[in-house]
């Protein structure tokens, strides 16, 4: 298993971009070039951020995920990270991710310790999503906003970080058919951008082990 013998907190701090280097790091990405790789037409970019929350349990590390409510206007019922658009009052993408996580899950932002960020991802509908990794104090309790979140759950990081558990499958969404990356666990289908961001984190932290 890829996590065996690894101090995950140390690895996160070694391989992620720390908060004090955000501006230089994020300024180095060409939005339109990233958008072009999706096959979408050029256009204005909407900046957003998600929180990638990690919990250290006695039985091992887990990742906190949400399932969106069926009534949400976009991505209803999908497994997702808490997150949303950058607002004018947000100091940076870390502030965005923490605010959105608190609003969606009811977990106080004081219980999150942001560690760093990794590469932003631009979607076909022109959203640039920056993933912010944070550790959560395991004493947290949840109080989901029912307008946005139907469920909040944890998935073992050892499962999510096992490349053997990734699949390509046909997915139908909004009258289009895609072949997407998916991770299935405990009856849940993690796919689309959420699966991509998890795999990106896996490669950011353990590329040397994966490629060896």
Image (spheres, rainbow, N blue to C red):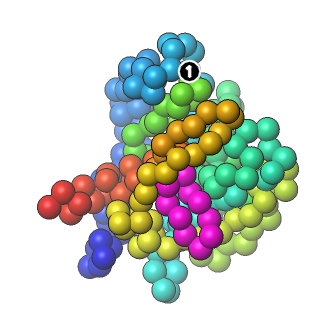
Q: Is residue 49 above or below residue 194?
A: above
Query: What is the span of residues highlighted in magenta in the rendered image?
Result: 182-191
Name the one closer to the observer, 80 or 185: 185
Residue 189 forms part of the magenta stretch: yes
Picture coordinates of residue 176 (x, y %)? 61, 33
Picture coordinates of residue 63 (x, y %)? 53, 66
Q: Quadrant of residue 86?
A: top right
Residue 30 forms part of the magenta stretch: no
Report the number of numbered marks. Answer: 1
Residue 88 visible in the picture: yes
Picture coordinates of residue 193 (x, y %)? 53, 44
Image position of 179 (left or right of 111): left
Name the one closer to the observer, 131 or 184: 184
Residue 27 visible in the picture: no
Name the one closer to the observer, 76 or 205: 76
Image position of 109 (left or right of 36): right
Q: Residue at x 74, y 68 (%)?
A: 142
Q: Residue at x 78, y 59 (%)?
A: 150
Q: Main secondary structure of the magenta part?
A: strand
Q: Secondary structure at mark 1?
A: loop
Q: Residue at x 50, y 13 (%)?
A: 42
Q: Is residue 209 above or below residue 72?
A: below
Q: Residue at x 65, y 39 (%)?
A: 173
Q: Is residue 89 above or below residue 198?
A: above
Residue holding disc 1: 45
Q: Is residue 33 above or below residue 49?
A: above
């Amino acid at each position: 298993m890829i996590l065996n013998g690894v101090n995950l907190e140390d690895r996160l701090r070694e391989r992620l971009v720390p908060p004090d280097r955000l501006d230089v790091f994020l300024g180095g990405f060409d939005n339109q070039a990233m958008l072009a790789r999706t096959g979408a037409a050029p256009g204005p970019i909407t900046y957003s951020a998600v929180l990638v929350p990690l919990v250290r349990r006695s039985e091992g590390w887990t990742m906190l995920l949400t399932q969106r409510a069926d009534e949400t206007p976009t991505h209803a019922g999908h497994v997702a990270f808490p997150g949303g658009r950058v607002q004018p009052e947000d100091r940076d993408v870390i502030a965005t991710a923490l605010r959105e996580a608190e609003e969606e899950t009811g977990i106080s932002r004081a219980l999150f310790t942001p560690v760093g960020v990794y590469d932003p991802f631009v979607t076909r509908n022109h959203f640039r999503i920056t993933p912010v990794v944070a550790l959560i104090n395991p004493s947290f309790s949840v109080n989901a906003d029912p307008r946005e979140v139907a469920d909040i759950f944890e998935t073992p990081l050892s499962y999510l970080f096992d490349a053997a558990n990734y699949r390509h499958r046909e997915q139908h969404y909004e009258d289009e058919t895609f072949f997407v990356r998916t991770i299935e666990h405990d009856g849940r289908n993690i796919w689309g951008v959420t699966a991509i961001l998890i795999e990106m984190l896996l490669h950011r932290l353990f590329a040397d082990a994966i490629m060896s």
